[in-house]
Structure formats: C-alpha cells, structure tokens
Image: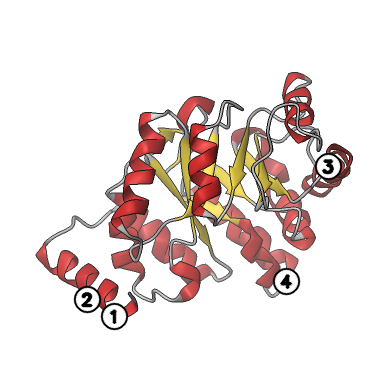
Amino acid sequence: MDYISLGKSELLVSRTAFGAVALEDASSDAKASDMAKIAFDEGVNFFDTARSSPESEERLGEAVKPFRKDIFLATKTRAHTSDELSEDIDSSLRALQTDYIDLYQLDSPSILPEIDGADGLIERLQRLKKDGIIHHFGITTDNFDIARAALNSNVGWETIQFPFNVLCTKEIEDFVADCQKSDIGFIAMRPLCGGIVQDIQTAFSYLHQFDWAVPVWGLSKKEELRQILKLTNRPPQPDQAFFDKVKVLREFFN
C-alpha cells in the first residue's frame, strides 16, 4: 500500500480510501465489520463517512474500534449554523465511538462559509480544532464554483472532496492539479461516477495517474473491495489500450 501526505493536513493516508457510507448497504453489521477489517489488514488507514448516514457512522465506529488509533477517521456535517454543527459533531463522536475526528468536512454547503460569517461555522470549526476535538477540517462539494472558491479562500481549508473520475473534463483535471500546487489535500469523490463507469480497472488506472489524489471507494461487497485492493497492491500501468478505453468512455458519456 502506498501512502501520501494529504496536503497541508500532513495526514499520511493510504492512496485508497474506504468510503464507509456504503456500509449502510451491507447485509449485516458483521459483514460491515468484515469489510473494514479486510481493508485495514491490507493497509487502508483512511475511512470516510458522513453524519447524513447515521447507520454508516455507527457501523464504522463498531468496526474500527479495535484499531481506531491506527487509522484516520473522516466524517461530514451538513450543518448550516454553529449550533447545528455542535449537535452533529457530538452525534458523530458517539456513533463513531471516538473522542476526536481526524478530518471533519463541511458537506455540500449551498454557499461557501466565510470568516466572521453570520452562521459562525468557521469559528466553530476553528474552536473544535483548537480543542483537539477535530484535528483538521475540509469541505465536500459537487459544485465546481464552490470548490474553486474554497481553493482560493483565506479560511484555511485543508482538504477538498470533489467528484473526480475518468469522465471528468480537462478543467477538472486542472483544478485537481491546482489543489496540489496550493497544498490542499484532494479527495476524489465518486470515482465510478455514481456507478455509471463499470470498468473498475480503467477507472482505477485513470485516478492512479494523479498521485496526490485520494479516491474514496464506496463499496458494500467483499468482492468489490478485494478487486480494488488487488489493483492498489499491483496498479496497472497505463498503455495505449488504456488511453483508447478512456477516449471511448468519454465520447460515449459526454
């Protein structure tokens, strides 16, 4: 397993992240725990979930309890005010059975919060970080304008999670490169474009070219997880056949 520093956060995370929101689709708590344990045993140390999926947080918290200190936990809040954020962080800490969150992400805001904004979100995030309840904070969005604004913001976002996959345009690729230049950790959301891309090897190979980006693979079945782990441990090298596949996929979907 390869590990990279996630931007200015300096979290040394596995290049393959476990998207735990999909654990709510696992057929049982035991199978959800097995999935997390398999990933951990293969070197995955970055697990991402969200408060909007309480069952996922609860299942993940129980699953990683034996190795909590050896991994990085990320979750998200859709809070619109500092009070809502306080409620969400307390709920997430209980569900995840932990007393701190490694990476806390503001999830899908309709507008980008600002320092001294009326919502008080930035000040609450900064206070939580100062108190050690969260260690780092970032933003998750599928709105390109908000992602770009976060990149240029003076708030100090440490990570940006944004949709990135083989179907993305050159503009998105340039944005991902700009995140690296600005030392902002980039987390690739929806690496299979929400299930539209069925060719996992091509999707993986495409993302693996961007060695500063961390894809979050949302997997609910062991066979899917094992396929990603196999590719992670023996990443295929892009060849002409790969570039031909990418061209065909983009022409078909775009």
Q: Alpha-carbon distance for marks 1 and 2?
A: 6 Å
Q: Is residue 173 left or right of residue 103?
A: left
Q: Where is residue 9 drawn, in percent x and y?
A: 53, 27
Viewer-side label of 2, 3 = 3
Q: Amino acid at mark 2?
A: Val
Q: Which residue is mark 4?
A: 28
- Tell me whether circle 3 and circle 4 mark residues in contact (CB < 8 Å): no
Q: Is residue 79 left or right of residue 196?
A: right
Question: Which quarter of the rendered picture does the C terminus lie within?
Answer: bottom left
Q: Which residue is mark 3?
A: 81
Q: Which residue is mark 2?
A: 248
Dot 3 falls on a residue whose secondary structure is loop
Determine which quarter of the picture holds residue 178.
top left
Question: Which quarter of the rendered picture does the N terminus lie within?
Answer: top left
Residue 25: assigned label? none
Q: Alpha-carbon distance for marks 3 and 1?
A: 42 Å
Q: Amino acid at mark 3?
A: Thr
Q: Is residue 240 left or right of residue 181?
A: left
Residue 252: assigned label? 1
Q: In the displayed image of the protein, which residue is found farthest to the left?
A: 240
Viewer-side label of 3, 1 = 3
Dot 1 falls on a residue whose secondary structure is helix
